[in-house]
Image: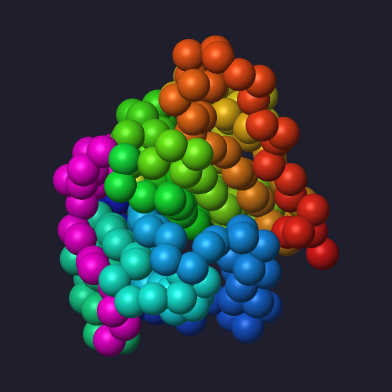
Amino acid sequence: MDRRQWFDQLASTWDATFTEDVTARLREIVAGLNIRPGARILDIGCGTGVLAAMLLDRAGCTSAVVALDISVEMLNRAQAKGLPVRYLLADGEKLPLRDDSFDWVICNAVFPHFPDKPAALGEIRRMLKEAGRLLICHPKGRALVNTIHRELGPPISADLIPPEEEMHSLLSAANLDHASIRDVPDRYVVLASRPLQNEERGQQEPEAPIRLSSLET
C-alpha cells in the first residue's frame, strides 16, 4: 500500500481525529498568521478540508483558497462541505500551478509525508509571491508526531519531522528565509518567507525574523 491508498482508507474517519481541542489549536495558529484580506492561500495536503473555513475567514473573500491533496477520497469529502475553495488532486512535489501565485502556502500535518522534502520546498518557493510566507504546522509537538508515525508503520513509519537544525538547512537551501520554529508539546509551527527580489540580490538588509509571539499560548 502506498501513501495515496493509505490516506484514501483514512478519509472516512479523518474528521473525527480533529477533536475540539485540536481544532481550537489550529484556529489559534491560523488566527496568529496576520493573513490580510484578499490574500491568496494554497493549502497543501488539505485532507478533508479541515482548515478551509478558517482560511476563508481570514482571507475575507471567496475564491481565495486553493487546496490540494494526493487522496481522491479526502478531496471528495472536502468538496462535499460546499465551501468556495478550488480543490485539486495533485502531488505537493509537482504542483500544477503558476509561479508567484500565492501570498501564503499552508502545510498542516503534511510536511513529514513528502518523500522528497527539498523538492517540495522548492515547489513551495516557486508558488510564493515575493515576501509570501510559508506555514508548516501540526497540532502536536514534533516528538509526538514522529512517535505516532513510527508506531503506525508503513507506509508512513519513516515520515518524520526533521530536527530543528535540519529544518533550518532545508528552508535555507530552498531560499526561504526569516525562519522561526516553535516546537512545544501541543503544537509545532514553522514560519518562513520568500525574500524580496532585492534581498535575493543582497541589495538591502533583510527584514526582522517573523515572530511567533502571537502564536504562543
Quarter of the image where one finds residue 61: bottom left
Vertical position of residue 43 compared to residue 164: above or below: below
Residue 20 location (% of width, % of height): 63, 83
In terms of secondary structure, what is the magenta stretch mainly? loop
Residue 149 location (% of width, % of height): 51, 50
User: Which region is colored magenta?
Assistant: 82-99
Vertical position of residue 82 compared to residue 51: above or below: below
Q: Is residue 122 magenta?
A: no
Residue 126 shown left or right of residue 59 in the figure: left
Whether residue 120 is visible, yes or no, is: no
Residue 195 location (% of width, % of height): 51, 29
What residue lies at 60% left-to-right and 44% top-to-bottom? 191
Quarter of the image where one finds residue 123: top left
What residue lies at 50% left-to-right and 39% top-to-bottom? 131
Q: Name the residue furthest top.
A: 202
Residue 180 location (% of width, % of height): 68, 38
Quadrant, the C terminus: bottom right
Whether residue 99 is visible, yes or no, is: yes
What residue lies at 55% left-to-right and 13% top-to-bottom? 202
Q: Is residue 92 magenta?
A: yes
Residue 147 shown left or right of residue 38 in the figure: right
Please count the marks in the image.
0
> How is the rendered protein coloured?
rainbow
